[in-house]
Image (cartoon, helix red, strand yellow):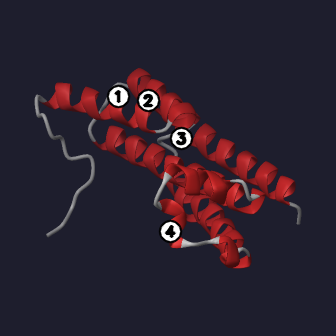
Amino acid sequence: MSLSSVFQIANVLALFGWILLIAVPRWKQTSILVFNFIVILLCLAYIGLIAFNIKNLNFNSFASLESVAELFSNRSMLLAGWLHYLSFDLVMGLLITEHSLKHNVASQLVMLCLLLTFFLGPLGFLIYYIAVAIKEKNVAPHLIDIKE
């Protein structure tokens, strides 16, 4: 399969995941489809690209901006980076959705934050985090339950 085909399929899958999170967040299959199907497929595609291009991966490639730019000049590694972004942004969108449903966060705010996370990743998450902090009057709200 060509890199362009993988790119197109990954984008369609990610878009489908975002549509589910935004349009039907309360449907019990949304979380399952987004995480157990879409995110996992994106991760598997990422791992496949890395495995087939392991010769292009040098951990020193992350030491400077110039070396990251050189790494991403390889189209396979650029696509791997794109799959990384798609999968992790979807996980953040799922975290926002799940938290908002458990804590009755206004759906308009959630939709705005999901759209911002879809397009601008960390900005959408940060706005959601700040909104929850203000709502809860807590400067460090817990968006996930961490068991010790």
Please report contact status of discs 1 and 3: CB closer than 8 Å, yes or no.
no
Q: In this view, does 26 lie to the left or right of 87?
A: left
Separation of disc 4 and disc 3 at Cα?
37 Å
**Residue 148, percent from left and from top:** 14, 70
The crowd level at tag 1 (other Cα within 10 Å; few <14, some 14-19, many 20+) is: some
**Residue beneath label 1, please?**
127
| Mark sitting on residue 60 | 4
Sequence-wise, the earlier of marks 1 and 4 is 4
Q: Is residue 123 left or right of residue 140?
A: right
Q: Disc 1 marks which amino acid?
A: Ile
Q: Mark 1 falls on what kind of element?
A: helix
**Residue 136, percent from left and from top:** 15, 31
Nearer to me, 119 or 144: 119
Sequence-wise, the earlier of marks 1 and 2 is 2
Q: Mark 3 falls on what kind of element?
A: helix
Q: Disc 2 marks which amino acid?
A: Cys
Which of labels 1 and 3 is toward the front? Answer: 1
The crowd level at tag 2 (other Cα within 10 Å; few <14, some 14-19, many 20+) is: many
Separation of disc 1 and disc 2 at Cα?
7 Å
Separation of disc 4 and disc 2 at Cα?
35 Å
Nearer to me, 105 or 86: 86
- Residue at 69% across, 78% down: 55
Please report contact status of discs 1 and 2: CB closer than 8 Å, yes or no.
yes
**Residue beneath label 2, please?**
113
